[in-house]
Image (cartoon, rainbow, N blue to C red):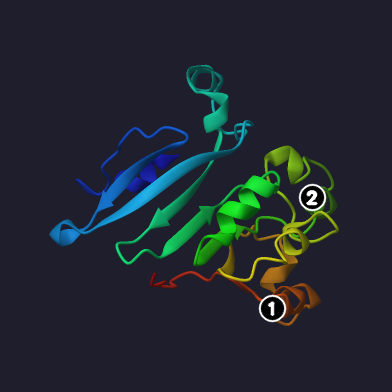
Amino acid sequence: MFAMLNRAPDQVSWKEISCDGGFCLQGEGGAGINCNVFSLGNRFPAYVSRDRFSALKPEEALLGVVAESSSGKRLAYMPAVPEIDDSLLKRLEETDLLLFDGTFWSDDELIRVQGGGSTARQMGHIAVSGSDGSLRKLAALRRPRKIFIHVNNTNPMLEESGPEYAEVRAAGWEVAEDGWSLEL
């Protein structure tokens, strides 16, 4: 899967990281971004092979990252979130920019669209909508700029003229688009 990141020589430099640990991304001139990594869940995605699965730690199945710039600004990157608890809410409230799992609008989205399959929760994603969805569970967050990322092409919030998109925008969220550049 990650072969696409290695199309050009020295395009990627791989480094082992561990859950509940940190690392520093070094930029030109020695400026760095400190990253704190933590577990969001223990269910590996379906594409992880049995051999690879047996060599990995369950707490590293789904990871979140909070990156802090030299200015002290913090970005939370959460592409796959199975649940939102008080610990995660506290962590997110301390960030300036939140990039959050917007994969599915509803828990049964793929089942309705494809006529079968897994629910969003079974795949390690909390749905955006519903009484236990991320839109409601994160409504009290006031500090960070909130952007949904990792949006599946079946998610109706991608339709800018639709009611789902209007609901997301009314709640103070944005839906990421290809090509965006964000400054922290």
The answer to whether marks 2 and 1 mark residues whose Cβ atoms lie closer than 8 Å is: no
Q: In the image, is 184 to the left or to the right of 60?
A: left
Determine the secondary structure under disc 2.
helix
Q: Is residue 7 above or below residue 184?
A: above
Q: In the image, is 131 to the left or to the right of 61?
A: right
Q: Quadrant of the N terminus?
A: top left
Q: Percent position (x, y) of residue 58?
A: 57, 25
Amino acid at circle 2: Gln
Viewer-nearest of labels 2 and 1? 1
Q: In the image, is 59 to the left or to the right of 35?
A: right
Residue 160 in view of the camera: yes
User: At 75% across and 43% down in the image, what residue appears?
Assistant: 121
Q: Decide: few, some or many residues near mark 2? Use Cα within 10 Å; few <14, some 14-19, many ≥20.
A: few
Residue wearing tag 2: 114
Q: Is residue 48 above or below residue 146?
A: above
- In this view, the residue in front, 123 or 16, is 16
- Residue 117: quarter of image: top right
Residue 150 in view of the camera: no
Q: Is residue 21 above or below residue 160?
A: above
Q: Say whether disc 2 or disc 1 marks the residue closer to the N-terminus.
A: 2
Amino acid at circle 1: Arg
